[in-house]
Amino acid sequence: MARLTHRGYPESRIGLIFAYPERNDIVEGQPLSSRYGRFLKHALYESGIKPRDCYIDYLCPVFPGRRGLASIEAQDEVDEYKPELRKHIREQTNLQVVVLFGPEVLPHFKIEDSLAKVRGFVFDKGRIPVIPTYHPRAIFAGLGEQEVTFMNDLEKAARISLEGFTRPAEDFILGPSYEDVRAFLMPIIREQRRIYVDIEAVGSLNERDRNEITMVGVGCRKTGRVLVIPFLQRGGTRYWPPSVEEKVHSLLTKALTSCPGVFP
């Protein structure tokens, strides 16, 4: 059975790990040769990442067919290749971050939660932090509205590859009430403190004017706290009642326009 193993260079700063290569990758003898790979190449370039400079590897170095990694044969390949994968990662001494594509990869990096819960988070896995995200196949198969989110994850990887990663020690405020938002933002607005802002949205890159913000994270170095302000819940329902959302928007707009901000 034809295999496609890793591709990497001593200077590679970003790693891309997939469950297995696509059939076209095997035929061409090159990673990212399928339509999903071509889409990913474009997305990487848009994120400031040169695909040819990336270290690329797989859990399973063969194309396992329709059953994916569920077949006994594929699992045997995974078990046989695992020491090689670990060896390849150790040899990439310049790696700053690894992106994990698709849910099948997560358990092999000791990430037990579902991809929907952990996508975009940075996990500190020893020497090299990892970022789980969607497989490009998922964007084609009905998650097109997550294209912007997918791009955000790649841009985060690009930043870490250049700046490195320092585990934050912040205290996160999740599921806030309006009172929580007001109590967090008003001192910041009053003292015009520097804030760090991260915005997540859903939608298509081709229809940016129709994208919707799902969440805004606001961090304050002085307090060491981060407020996560949700706007859309899973399923697309609004987090806030309309009258409260208007007040949250007003406070957030005042903070963004009156305080010095850093947008990573």
Image: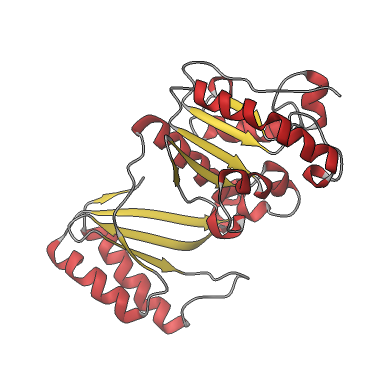
Please state the total of marks drawn on the protein image: 0
Q: Is residue 181 above or below residue 262?
A: below
As drawn, is 91 to the left or to the right of 137? Answer: left
Snapshot quadrant of residue 85? top right
**Residue nearest the viewer, comparing 161 with 216:** 161
As drawn, the residue found furthest toward the top would be 10
Residue drawn at the location 36% of the way across and 34% of the way down: 164
Q: Is residue 252 above or below residue 124?
A: below
Where is residue 129 drawn, in percent x and y? Answer: 45, 40
As drawn, is 264 to the left or to the right of 42? Answer: left
Where is residue 37 drawn, in percent x and y? Answer: 70, 32
Quadrant in which the C terminus is drawn: top left
Residue drawn at the location 57% of the way across and 23% of the way down: 88
Colour setup of the view:
secondary structure
As drawn, is 61 to the left or to the right of 204? Answer: right
**Residue nearest the viewer, comparing 16 with 50:** 16
Quadrant in which the N terminus is drawn: top right
Where is residue 143 drawn, in percent x and y? Answer: 68, 54
Snapshot quadrant of residue 192? bottom left
**Residue nearest the viewer, comparing 167 with 82:** 82
Q: Is residue 103 above or below residue 19?
A: below
Residue drawn at the location 71% of the way across and 48% of the way down: 138
Where is residue 21 drawn, in percent x and y? Answer: 74, 31
